[in-house]
């Protein structure tokens, strides 16, 4: 009988100056190179491996997501995560990277690689301003503020978020409905913990955001893949096939990963379904602020007369992901149970970071920063799209949507997108394979290319590098 995959991966992590995530990443990469496990073999679930290693689930989640993006792993819904069957039997093992003897505090952070998804324009974040606000917030700290923070978030930040959303996204709410979280994943985990029992059904976009999918699978939810077309999630198809579900998770502003907007008629049908069946809707508004052509649709929550929408936002895309701050706007009926769950599972987020973020919003810096980024992203998007067309010609099919932070590209005769990702990785690039965003098996292949960190004068050289890598 074959050994369980967990037995090959689960030994205690060694003492090392390397972060736990990097240690686990290298361990799994090395095991795959030894064919332990081999192509097509299943890996332990996130929950199981985290328990066996004695690390946080988020650590394993992040490592699995990184390996999926690089083409080493494939997620198969309820069947779990497996080593990619596309890996050739003679693929050479990755070269081991020697651990540096310098202490961890001297290590440089991972470099942002071209086309890497999920990052705002790191190169143009106003770090000097942020530093001044941080110093000012630190001087305000009292002795009481050095104790455990309120798990729900500081009143100042919750008030600032509520005021901003009311004006910018048309979301009517008060600070009592706002809960500060450690990012979108932490917020979705809190929702799943509060609302879902094992086996309960969740409508989920197909394709959809893979980290959200993994969180719901870890909660033992039964994911119902709902097809997405040019108008967003096909609500009628979901109602016909599985009319009752506990939860629907949607990205209505710019669907992740296809980039399309959920049309107004479908928004209305989705809200009507939730009101009729007593279901809840999670609106992941991860990049709703970045719309470049025409008028952007309002937030789904702004149309929510029956109060069935949980609005989830994050500062990861608008400021920087290292801040690790997000928020939920809860329907009034859910405030008490979610608050109780948050208090039971968290001591809250860093008080200093919350103070700086609150000042950044209330002093008007946030609105000015977003305005600047919209102009920058529009220019970078157009430059990359033009460079790709020039480089690939009629071999390229590309989706350039009115908003979002990436381009969806498909290449005629390009073969497996997982193989393209691997080849691009060897050239120092970091696209994401479209096929990894599907719950089930799909013949759809393509590359997701973020443009946020690609300066206009680098678009053409990088497009040519990509062409050489995946040729």
Image: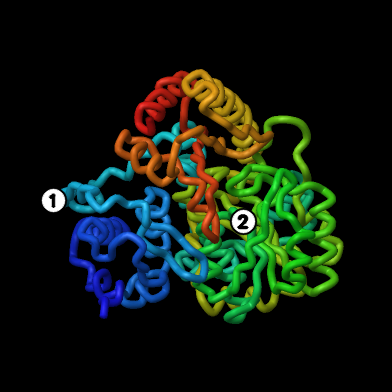
Q: SS for tag 1? A: loop
Q: Is residue 57 visible?
A: yes
Q: Is residue 85 above or below residue 306?
A: above
* Percent position of residue 289, x then y: 66, 41
Q: Residue furthest front?
A: 413
Q: Is residue 415 left or right of residue 108?
A: right
Residue 206, numbered circle: 2
CB contact under 8 Å: marks 1 and 2: no
Q: Is residue 178 left or right of residue 62?
A: right
Nearer the camera: disc 1 or disc 2: 2
Label 2 packing within 10 angstroms: few (<14), some (14-19), many (20+): many
Along the viewing direction, whichever of 125 and 382 lies nearer the viewer: 382
How is the structure coloured here? rainbow
Provide the residue designation for mark 1.
101
Q: CA distance from mark 1 to mark 2?
A: 45 Å
| Residue at 76% across, 54% down | 300
* Percent position of residue 242, x then y: 73, 70
Q: SS for tag 2? A: strand
| Residue at 51% across, 32% down | 412
Q: How many marks?
A: 2
* Percent position of residue 405, x then y: 57, 38
| Residue at 75% across, 50% down | 299
| Residue at 40% across, 27% down | 467
* Percent position of residue 429, x then y: 37, 36
Q: Is residue 133 visible?
A: no
């Amino acid at each position: 009988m074959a050994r369980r995959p967990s037995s090959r991966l689960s030994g205690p992590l060694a003492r090392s100056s390397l972060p736990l995530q990097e240690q686990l990443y290298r361990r799994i990469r090395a095991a795959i190179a030894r064919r332990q496990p081999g192509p097509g073999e299943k890996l332990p679930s996130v929950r199981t491996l985290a328990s066996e290693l004695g690390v946080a689930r988020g650590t394993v989640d992040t490592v699995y997501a990184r390996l999926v993006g690089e083409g080493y792993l494939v997620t198969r819904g309820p069947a779990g995560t497996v080593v990619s069957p596309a890996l050739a039997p003679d693929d050479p093992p990755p070269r081991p990277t020697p651990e540096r003897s310098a202490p961890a505090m001297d290590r440089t952070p991972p470099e942002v690689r071209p086309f890497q998804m999920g990052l705002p324009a790191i190169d143009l974040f106003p770090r000097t301003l942020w530093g001044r606000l941080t110093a000012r917030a630190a001087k305000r700290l009292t002795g009481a503020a050095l104790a455990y923070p309120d798990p729900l978030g500081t009143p100042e930040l919750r008030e600032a978020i509520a005021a901003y959303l009311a004006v910018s996204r048309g979301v009517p709410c008060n600070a009592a409905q706002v809960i500060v979280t450690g990012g979108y994943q932490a917020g979705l985990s809190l929702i799943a913990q509060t609302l879902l029992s094992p086996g309960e059904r969740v409508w989920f976009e197909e394709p959809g955001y893979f980290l959200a999918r993994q969180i719901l699978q870890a909660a033992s939810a039964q994911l119902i893949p709902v097809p997405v077309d040019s108008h967003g999630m096909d609500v009628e198809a979901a109602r016909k096939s599985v009319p009752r579900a506990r939860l629907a998770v949607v990205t209505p502003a710019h669907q992740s990963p296809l980039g399309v907007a959920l049309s107004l008629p479908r928004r209305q049908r989705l809200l009507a379904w939730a009101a009729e069946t007593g279901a809840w809707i999670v609106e992941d508004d991860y990049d709703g602020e970045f719309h470049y052509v025409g008028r952007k649709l309002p937030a789904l929550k702004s149309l929510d007369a029956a109060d069935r929408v949980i609005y989830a936002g994050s500062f990861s895309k608008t400021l920087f992901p290292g801040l690790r701050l997000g928020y939920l706007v809860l329907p009034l009926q859910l405030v008490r149970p979610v608050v109780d769950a948050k208090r039971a599972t968290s001591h809250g987020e860093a008080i200093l970071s919350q103070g700086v973020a609150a000042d950044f919003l209330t002093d008007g810096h946030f609105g000015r920063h977003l305005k600047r980024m919209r102009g920058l992203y529009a220019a970078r998007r157009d430059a990359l799209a033009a460079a790709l067309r020039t480089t690939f010609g009629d071999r390229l099919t590309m989706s350039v949507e009115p908003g979002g932070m990436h381009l969806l590209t498909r290449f005629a005769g390009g073969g497996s997108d997982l193989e393209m990702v691997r080849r691009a990785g060897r050239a120092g690039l970091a696209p994401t394979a479209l096929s990894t965003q599907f719950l089930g098996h799909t013949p759809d292949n393509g590359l997701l290319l973020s443009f946020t960190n690609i300066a206009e004068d680098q678009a053409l050289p990088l497009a040519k590098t990509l062409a050489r890598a995946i040729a």
